[in-house]
Image (cartoon, rainbow, N blue to C red):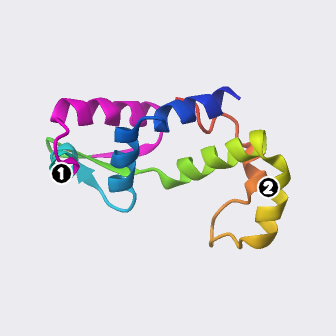
Amino acid sequence: MTESVDFAKAIADETRQRVMGLLCCEWLCVGDIVDKMHGVTQPTVSHHLAVLREAGLVHVRREGKQVFYSLNQDEVAVCCGRIMLNFAPQRVDELALNVAPSKGSADLADYADFSGACSS
């Protein structure tokens, strides 16, 4: 249950959710994120990236002095799956029947055996 709580804490902040949305499908550096956040300062963005990084929710890539970030969608999916198993187990089978997994994705039942997936 601790992993679910850690994940929930990491995504509980609205600013972090906005950052996650920006990083969903592309690599951005802190400056790019600040430019797209309109009114959020660089130190604030850096703080939220650190929280997301500690939770394993972002990938980090260095290019010279620049650091780029992208959302770790696999980790988000694993953590959401763990929350479902903990709090909505009756819906897991229902979803498995109604949603065909994408190529290479894990079945929701696989998340039960993924220890430490959401720990920071």
On the image, the x and y values in percent for residue 90 come to 85, 51
On the image, the x and y values in percent for residue 62 come to 25, 45
The magenta stretch spans which residues? Answer: 37-61
Determine the secondary structure under disc 2: helix
**Is residue 58 toward the left or the right of residue 93 in the image?**
left
The structure residue drawn at horizontal position 74% and vertical position 55%, both measured from the top left corner, is 108
On the image, the x and y values in percent for residue 61 come to 30, 47
For disc 1, the neighbor class at 10 Å (few under 14, some 14 to 19, many from 20) is: few
Type of amino acid under label 1: Asp
The structure residue drawn at horizontal position 41% and vertical position 45%, both measured from the top left corner, is 17
Residue 32 shows which numbered tag? 1
For disc 2, the neighbor class at 10 Å (few under 14, some 14 to 19, many from 20) is: some
Callouts 2 and 1 close, C-beta under 8 Å:
no
Determine the secondary structure under disc 1: helix
Residue 92 shows which numbered tag? 2
The structure residue drawn at horizontal position 29% and vertical position 56%, both measured from the top left corner, is 27
- The image shows residue 95, relative to residue 63, as above or below, that is below
- The image shows residue 20, relative to residue 87, as above or below, that is below
The structure residue drawn at horizontal position 25% and vertical position 53%, both measured from the top left corner, is 28
Residue 39 belongs to the span the image colors magenta: yes
Furthest-top residue in view?
A: 2
- The image shows residue 49, relative to residue 88, as above or below, that is above
**Is residue 21 toward the left or the right of residue 107 in the image?**
left
Type of amino acid under label 2: Val
On the image, the x and y values in percent for residue 68 come to 26, 48
State the separation of the CA atoms marked 2 and 1: 38 Å
Q: Does label 2 or label 1 sit earlier along the sequence? A: 1
